[in-house]
């Protein structure tokens, strides 16, 4: 597997800290986009994130370290999908993630549209069979098909639900769905924290704790950037108002670690870079590095 050098890798770090052999963390780039339903551009997400990451500071004040030098981060060359679509494209991603997990790497997958997340989730589920999925999104993505495709970005979680226990799925920030998705959530026992319920205080002031209480010890995070409010994340194909803010979102991640749980993998999808608008790309890059810093922080307590 070819690794990118400092001019193109995550955080623009030197080969000493970005070789696949020595790094604890591996970045997979999956610039896949085939089922656009509103705004396009998600295939440019991985490149936009990597470019912006060069301006993210190495030091994290909360953990008091420079994680990229302590653990190392290797960035693999983007997957070239050619004419591969749907299941064939997912197979390419899954094979790469499988190989990295066999090497005991912490894998971060960058999309691309949200349909790509089915692949790293499947790979991680084999490696961590008792894990939960923590799904940040404006949409529940549980349509059985959308615009004629069962592999649509609007259907990725429906595909995941075909092989993954639905009661181990927790969704946060949902605020746009069809009635069939709402019915599916109730029928299958998916833990869904609607944005409107959070804002109305239905989950209490410390709603982040309630979210984390629904999770198993091992947690895989799939993060659609449209979970964020458009005021901080306008660069996405299907923005929805009344979204999550950055600090309250990071509080969920903090609580995962405080509770004694561990983050075992991560994907971030649906960034659609806008020319001349830098802050969404930088916000996404910083989000990834922040989650990594917290993921590699030893828990302060043990989950009973």
Image (cartoon, rainbow, N blue to C red):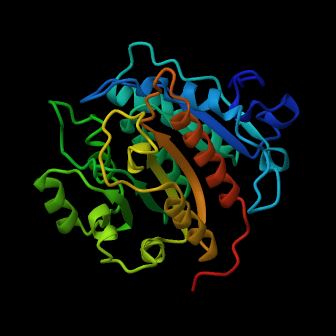
Looking at the image, residue 286 lies above or below residue 187? above
Front position in the image: 10 or 59: 59
Front position in the image: 35 or 271: 271
Looking at the image, residue 155 lies above or below residue 259? above
Look at 44% across and 44% down and name the residue there.
225
Let me know if residue 10 appears in the view: yes
- In the drawing, does residue 246 fall left or right of residue 32? right
Q: Residue furthest right?
A: 16
Q: Name which quarter of the figure residue 96 lies in.
A: top right
- In the drawing, does residue 66 fall left or right of residue 45? right
Q: Residue furthest top?
A: 82
Q: Residue furthest bottom?
A: 304
Whole-percent x and y of residue 197? 28, 69
Looking at the image, residue 11 lies above or below residue 104? above
Q: Name which quarter of the figure residue 236 lies in.
A: top left
Look at 51% across and 37% down and name the residue there.
280
Front position in the image: 276 or 101: 276
| The C terminus, quarter of image | bottom right
| The N terminus, quarter of image | top right
Whole-percent x and y of residue 24? 75, 46
Look at 41% across and 54% down and name the residue there.
136
Whole-percent x and y of residue 86? 33, 28
- In the drawing, does residue 16 fall left or right of residue 186? right
Look at 54% across and 39% down and name the residue there.
109
Whole-percent x and y of residue 64? 81, 60
Let me know if residue 125 appears in the view: no
């Amino acid at each position: 597997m070819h690794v990118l050098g400092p001019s193109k890798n995550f955080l623009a770090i030197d080969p000493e800290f970005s070789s696949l052999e020595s790094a604890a963390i591996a970045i997979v780039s999956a610039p896949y986009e085939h089922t656009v339903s509103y705004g396009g551009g998600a295939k440019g997400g991985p490149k936009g994130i990597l470019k912006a990451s060069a301006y993210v500071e190495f030091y994290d004040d909360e953990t008091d370290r420079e994680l990229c030098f302590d653990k190392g981060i290797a960035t693999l060359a983007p997957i070239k999908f050619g004419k591969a679509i749907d299941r064939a494209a997912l197979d390419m991603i899954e094979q790469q993630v499988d190989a990295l997990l066999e090497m005991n790497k912490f894998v971060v997958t960058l999309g691309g549209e949200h349909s790509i997340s089915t692949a790293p989730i499947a790979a991680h589920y084999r490696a961590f069979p008792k894990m939960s999925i923590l799904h940040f999104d404006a949409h529940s993505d549980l349509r059985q098909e959308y615009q004629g495709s069962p592999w649509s970005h609007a259907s990725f979680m429906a595909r995941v639900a075909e092989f993954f226990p639905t009661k181990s799925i927790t969704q946060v920030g949902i605020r746009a769905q069809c009635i069939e998705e709402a019915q599916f959530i109730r029928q299958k026992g998916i833990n869904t924290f609607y944005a409107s319920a959070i804002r109305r205080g239905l989950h209490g002031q410390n709603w982040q704790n309630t979210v984390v209480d629904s999770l198993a010890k091992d947690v895989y995070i799939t993060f659609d950037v449209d979970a964020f409010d458009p005021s901080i994340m306008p660069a996405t194909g299907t923005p929805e108002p009344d979204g999550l803010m950055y600090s309250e979102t990071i509080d969920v991640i903090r609580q995962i670690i405080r509770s004694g749980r561990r983050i075992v993998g991560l994907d971030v999808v649906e960034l659609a870079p806008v020319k001349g608008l830098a802050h969404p790309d930088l916000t996404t890059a910083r989000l990834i590095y922040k989650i990594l810093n917290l993921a590699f922080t030893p828990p302060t307590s043990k989950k009973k």
